[in-house]
């Protein structure tokens, strides 16, 4: 494990990275705006669960496969881009709801709705190969070159990164939930949905046109 100074640097870097807006943050914020803080937190935990998949996959070599195989990267890239585009188009085409319906949704999403929100966050993260590449590039910087079991340290640091992300997830959800109580935000919620949908479409197109990592090989 890194010494205390490097560990604190790892934690600080993780917080800064999680504060940076992206598809995961947008997913948390939009669900919190539409269905309340609990929905945003549930969506965030879906995202974090998806991160665990990338962490353990990278530890056993699947992440390296994505980093070196053009075919594997391309398949996951297009599936992930299609899913982001689907989310974006659905939000752009969503119908406006009267304020009463919005307040009812914010009072608490149904159990089935929370399950869907969780799975949506999970797949948004799992189907993004750039997350796998991020862990492969970021975490090893904090593992000593002479470490006996690099895979174990990778998993430990990856788990720490995820646990370290929980306050940021809750913070984003709470902030968006607070914003949703503003009357101006409630009146413009439909347009916020459309704007978020456009951003999701943009993220999907950006992912679709992302090149595989340098040094990639064939299938």
Image (spheres, rainbow, N blue to C red):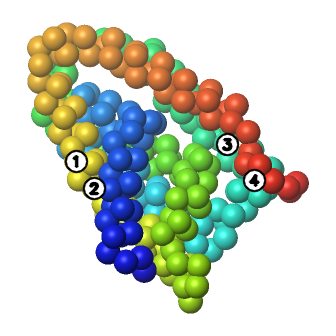
Q: Quadrant of the N terminus?
A: bottom left
| Residue 99 in the figure: left or right of residue 202 | left
Which mark identifies residue 155?
Answer: none
**Residue 114 figure quarter:** top left
Count the numbered circles shown.
4
Task: Identify the residue shown where x is 33% and y is 11%.
Answer: 191
Question: Residue beneath label 1, please?
Answer: 170
Residue 32, position as x, y percentages in the image: 25, 34
Determine the CA span between mark 3 and mark 4. Answer: 8 Å
Residue 24, position as x, y percentages in the image: 42, 41
| Residue 155 in the figure: left or right of residue 100 | right
Q: Is 10 or 180 nearer to us in this picture? A: 10
Question: Residue beneath label 2, please?
Answer: 166
Question: Residue beneath label 4, please?
Answer: 72
What is the secondary structure assignment of the residue under circle 1?
A: helix
| Residue 170 in the figure: left or right of residue 159 | left
Determine the CA span between mark 1 and mark 3. Answer: 28 Å
Determine the CA span between mark 2 and mark 4. Answer: 30 Å
Q: Are marks 3 and 4 in contact (CB under 8 Å)?
A: no
Q: Is 206 or 126 nearer to us in this picture? A: 206
Q: Is residue 28 above or below residue 45?
A: above
Disc on the earlier residue, 1 or 3: 3
Residue 91, position as x, y percentages in the image: 43, 21
Determine the CA span between mark 3 and mark 2. Answer: 26 Å
Q: Nearer the viewer, mark 3 or mark 2?
A: 2
Task: Identify the residue shown where x is 52% and y is 59%.
Answer: 138
């Amino acid at each position: 494990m890194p010494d205390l100074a490097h560990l604190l640097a790892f934690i600080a870097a993780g917080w800064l990275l999680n504060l940076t807006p992206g598809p995961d943050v947008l997913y948390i914020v939009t669900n919190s705006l539409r269905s309340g803080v609990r929905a945003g937190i549930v969506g965030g935990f879906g995202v974090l669960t998806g991160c665990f998949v990338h962490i353990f996959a990278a530890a056993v070599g699947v992440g390296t496969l994505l980093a070196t195989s053009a075919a594997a990267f391309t398949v996951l890239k297009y599936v992930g881009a299609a899913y982001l585009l689907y989310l974006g188009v659905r939000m752009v085409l969503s119908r406006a709801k009267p304020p009463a319906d919005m307040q009812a949704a914010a009072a608490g999403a149904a159990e089935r709705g929370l399950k869907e929100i969780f799975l949506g966050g999970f797949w948004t993260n799992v189907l993004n190969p750039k997350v796998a590449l991020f862990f492969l590039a970021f975490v090893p910087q904090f593992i000593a070159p002479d470490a006996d079991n690099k895979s174990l340290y990778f998993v430990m640091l990856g788990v720490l990164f995820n646990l370290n992300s929980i306050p940021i997830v809750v913070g984003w959800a709470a902030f968006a939930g607070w914003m949703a109580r503003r009357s101006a935000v409630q009146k413009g919620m439909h347009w916020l949905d459309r704007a978020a949908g456009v951003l999701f479409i943009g993220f999907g197109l950006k992912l679709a046109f992302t090149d595989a990592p340098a040094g990639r090989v064939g299938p």
